[in-house]
């Protein structure tokens, strides 16, 4: 069974179509990259999966639970980190983790907080307010919060955008551990094609709200006459019509 | 409803308050100033008016109860504003927290903060100005409960307004108690008001509370049915407020406003 099943997802704002009939699945232990130029519909899709944006049509099921009819069960199995959703800066790292851990119903919360603090090397920031951390440190706290409930589905919207290469590599390693060590799945957006190639098992290119291309990030560029994923990305952004499926 | 999730919101509010002088002081400073100001005013009035009439329970008691109502309302809105100020809606509403649990968390937070204000007011009014509030015993509880319930309702309505109109609508919320006070008959009988104001007053639960309290303090007949009407109105107000917040939230999810709240509008 898929961890995430998205069928014919559509979102319109008046005459503007933001997402146009997108369907895809994320399997257990799979990292799926959702790629595309700015405004392609990636964040709109993620917001619909997070339940903070109502689809105009289509369905979303997380771990077999319909988001529309069983919202709580679906979201209990989900968590996310996004560069545009930092944790409250007026709470310390530990206070934030405790607050969100309680919202997600994490069992043995104290031990779990200790574990993610260790995992993301946050011990020295435990009692520091998140607002005074560097953007990279804040990102690590956000990813630690996203791991807190050991979600079945992890949504990561540009999780390494503000990290230095070493820390970004470290976070990528943790995400790989997450999929290797359990049966969770990850939906990942990034503009770093090196990262996508190294982390994702499968990628989908969105353009104008539709899935334009889908496949293995290592072989997909060659299948479309491009040398690298970055070249393919640029082609999707500039000449999407030449790449229509 | 999951009590842990409700408690999480209370715990968050406790973390914020205990770590911030600017959140601790407002819990008691304005109510304390009100009690001191009105306490001396009632003392003065007692010296210049006919002997035998005591202004302390009539005016100071009314100020205390009105301030309690205001604190309850602001306790709800302040807990909500914490999520507005820290741009936390995406994190909050993408979690398994239900709207009912969120509103319950705001209410529990308000109980904590308004209790501090009430205790400070009672201590000051009793110790410094001789207000024998406790002499009315448990008879006071229904009056306070009606004010509490209506304060919760108004607080949730205030949250709905800010959720719908964006962070800048915060200023709409602060003057609401002042706007209502002329109609609520805090310091004078409702019969003093012109007819059109009396009609509005009859729709406001606090008017029944203050009419009833005045009757008791002045030794006049008090009809329980009158307070019951206020209680029914205040409970109805809570239902209307919760329905309004839910409707506004659904609109925000439909339009995408939750995810782009700082933009104030998605149009």
Image (cartoon, rainbow, N blue to C red):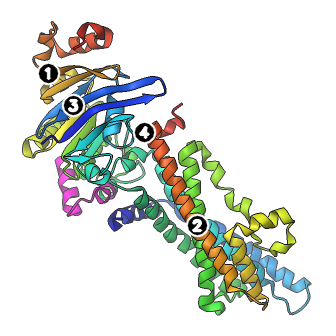
Q: Is residue B65 left or right of residue A165?
A: right
Pointer 3 and pointer 2: residues touching (CB < 8 Å)? Answer: no
Q: CA distance from mark 3 to mark 4?
A: 23 Å
Q: Nearer the viewer, mark 2 or mark 4?
A: 2
Q: Are marks 3 and 2 on the same chain?
A: no
Q: Position of residue A165 (x, y in %)?
A: 21, 29
Residue B237 percent across, percent down from the top left: 59, 64
Determine which residue is flagged by label 2. Answer: B236
Query: What label does residue A217 carry, if any?
Result: 1
Dot 3 and dot 4 within a common chain: no
In this rendering, the answer to whether A106 lies above or below A196 is below
Give the secondary structure at mark 4.
loop
Residue at numbered disc 3: A24
Which residue was labeled with disc 4? B259
Mark 2 vs mark 1: give the one in front.
2
- Let me know if marks 4 and 1 both belong to one chain: no
| Magenta residues, start to end | A99-119
Nearer the observer, A191 or A76: A76
The answer to whether the residue labelled 4 contacts the one labelled 1, judged by CB atoms less than 8 Å apart, is no
Q: Residues within 10 Å of mark 1 (few under 14, many from 20)?
A: many
Residue B15 position by quadrant: bottom left
Residue at (16, 9) in percent of width and height: A224
Where is the C terminus of chain B found, in terms of image quarters? top right
A100 within the magenta span: yes
Provide the secondary structure element on which disc 3 rests.
strand
Q: Is residue B258 magenta?
A: no
CA gap between label 3 and label 2 equals 46 Å
Label 2 resides on the chain identified as B
State whether discs 2 and 1 lie on one chain: no
Give the chain of mark 3. A
Residue found at the far left of this picture: A180
């Amino acid at each position: 069974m898929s961890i995430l099943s998205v069928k014919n997802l559509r979102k319109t704002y008046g005459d503007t179509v933001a997402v146009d009939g997108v369907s895809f699945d994320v399997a257990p232990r799979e990292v799926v990259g959702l790629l595309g130029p700015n405004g392609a519909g990636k964040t709109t899709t993620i917001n619909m999966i997070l339940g903070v944006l109502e689809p105009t049509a289509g369905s979303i099921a997380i771990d077999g639970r319909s988001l529309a009819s069983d919202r709580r069960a679906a979201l209990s199995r989900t968590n996310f980190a996004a560069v545009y959703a930092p944790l409250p800066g007026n709470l310390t790292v530990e206070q934030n983790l405790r607050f969100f851990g309680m919202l997600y119903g994490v069992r043995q919360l104290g031990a779990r907080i200790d574990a993610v603090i260790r995992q993301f090397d946050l011990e020295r920031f435990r009692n520091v307010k998140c607002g005074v951390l560097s953007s990279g440190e804040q990102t690590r706290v956000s990813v630690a919060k996203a791991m807190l409930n050991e979600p079945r589905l992890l949504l990561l919207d540009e999780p390494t955008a503000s990290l230095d290469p070493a820390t970004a590599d470290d976070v990528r390693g943790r995400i790989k551990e997450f999929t290797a060590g359990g049966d969770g799945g990850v939906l990942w957006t990034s503009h770093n094609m090196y990262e996508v190639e190294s982390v994702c098992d499968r990628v989908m290119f969105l353009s104008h709200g539709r899935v334009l291309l889908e496949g293995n990030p290592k072989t997909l560029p060659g299948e479309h006459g491009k040398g690298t994923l970055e070249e393919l990305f640029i082609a999707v952004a500039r000449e999407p019509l030449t790449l229509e499926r | 409803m999951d009590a842990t999730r409700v408690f999480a919101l209370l715990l968050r509010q406790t973390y914020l308050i205990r770590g911030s002088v600017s959140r601790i002081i407002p819990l008691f400073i304005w109510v304390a100033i009100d009690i001191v100001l009105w306490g001396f005013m009632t003392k003065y009035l007692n010296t210049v008016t006919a002997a035998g009439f005591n202004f302390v329970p009539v005016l100071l008691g009314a100020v205390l109860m009105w301030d309690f109502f205001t604190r309850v309302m602001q306790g709800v809105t302040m807990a909500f504003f914490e999520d507005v100020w820290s741009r936390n809606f995406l994190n909050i509403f993408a979690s398994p927290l239900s709207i009912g649990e969120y509103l319950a968390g705001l209410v529990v937070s308000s109980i904590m903060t308004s209790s501090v204000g009430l205790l400070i007011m009672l201590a000051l009014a009793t110790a410094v100005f001789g207000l024998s509030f406790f002499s009315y015993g448990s008879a006071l509880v229904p009056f306070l409960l009606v004010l509490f319930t209506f304060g919760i309702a108004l607080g949730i309505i205030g949250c709905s307004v800010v959720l719908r109109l964006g962070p800048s609508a915060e200023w709409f919320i602060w003057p609401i108690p002042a706007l209502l006070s002329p109609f609520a008959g805090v310091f004078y009988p409702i019969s003093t008001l012109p007819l059109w104001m009396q009609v509005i007053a009859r729709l406001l639960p606090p008017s029944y509370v203050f009419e009833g309290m005045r009757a008791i303090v002045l030794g006049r007949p008090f009809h329980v049915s009158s307070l019951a009407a206020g209680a029914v109105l205040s409970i109805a107000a809570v239902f209307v407020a919760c329905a309004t917040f839910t409707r506004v939230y659904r609109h925000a999810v439909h339009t995408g406003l939750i995810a782009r709240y700082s933009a104030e509008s998605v149009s």
